[in-house]
Amino acid sequence: MFPALLPTYNRTDVAFVRGEGSYLFAEDGKRYLDFGAGIAVNAFGHANARLVSALTKQAQTLWHTSNLYRVPGQESLSKKLVANTFADTVFFTNSGTEAIELAIKMARRYHFASDHPERFHIVSFEGAFHGRTYAAINAGGNEKYLEGFGPKMPGFDLVPAGDIAAVKKVVGPQTAAIIIEPLQGESGVKQIAPDFLKALRKLCDDNGILLIFDEIQTGLGRTGKFFAYDWLGITPDIMTVAKALGGGFPVGAVLATADAAKGMTVGTHGTTYGGNPLAMAVGNEAIDMILEPGFLDHVNKIAGYLHQQLGALTAAHPGVFESVRGQGLMIGLKMKTDAAAFIAAARANGLVVLPAGDNVVRLLPPLTLTEEEAREGLDLLNKTASQIEAQKAAAQ
């Protein structure tokens, strides 16, 4: 019999039924330290009291009206985002992949409004992940995700990340925009050189092209700044946001300059649920928490401690780990042993970590992680590595 739940996931046989701060509890009562945070979504831990309060208060008054009317929560949250970023305007979505769809539409519409409808090509990069909708998988270019869904969508030019010569080779009168993650997550927590990102900005400026940053995973404190572009001294024209924006509640957004958004006039885009009062109540509280004095200082302090200790961990287990990657609390452990086996062993020890490409174990703990919890996580990683070493020795 075909399963009632569409089998598109190879799910781990663990069901979490409760969360508290940095911990998850399974239906059998076992407690796990969560270094995955729902893939960088639960940035404030589980059942954060302030987010619960904001959601509960809103749920008792109004859930949904639609975007046919003013939504005060959208107005307040958009003003906060505009005041603290490069952007002049914001559109709220339900998810990151919806934000990607709008970013692509916005870039193409910009050139249409500039009397250049022939400029619709988007340059993207090998190893990127922008979501699972049809346009998003074409932007990402991963053949595994494209297989079986018909012809490739025209207008996407895929090039190696970090190769500015390759970018210049595909840029032409057909090019509308360049889209890139400042730090690639899904393909293995691969860092993009700042000089390359700055070179993209200059290339866009010189050729009338829009620069799109996908900060769905890197944004909202994950790298130690409000957004990853804050480390670079440059800004994008369009930016996609999601994950931590709702702290666990589904919400995404596209941020843009007034110029980049000039083609998005009444009727050019819409959403039924995007920016609903529930999402906006949680999003407003989440942004307030991130922008509070000391929050990002804490992220950088814990990140510095973790990176230092993970460096020592890899040195202590040279047969298990190859290197530490990443920035802030977006961390990858490049493995010499099988990453999937390590993840399973860590989970058995009570630690949740995530897979990524390139045989990498990904660590995305809550931004509210304490130093004591960080030490506990390091102890569990060390325990797991020792077990892997013992298994290898026994097999020889």
Image: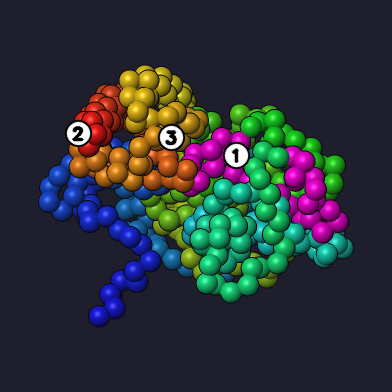
* Region in magenta: 164-192
- Name the image quarter holding the N terminus: bottom left
**Pointer 1 residue:** 182
Sequence-first disc among 1 and 2: 1
Amino acid type at mark 2: Ala
Q: Mark 1 or mark 2: which is in front?
A: 2
**Pointer 2 residue:** 394
Q: To which quarter of the image does residue 213 belong?
A: top right
**Pointer 3 residue:** 334
In percent of width and height, residue 172 lies at 84, 53
How far is the residue under mark 1 from the one under mark 2?
42 Å
Q: Secondary structure at mark 2?
A: helix
Amino acid type at mark 3: Lys
Q: Residue at x 39, y 34 (%)?
A: 336
Sequence-first disc among 3 and 2: 3
* Number of other residues with Cα within 10 Å of mark 3, as a class: few under 14, some 14 to 19, many 20 or more: many
* Number of other residues with Cα within 10 Å of mark 2, as a class: few under 14, some 14 to 19, many 20 or more: few
How far is the residue under mark 3 from the one under mark 2?
23 Å
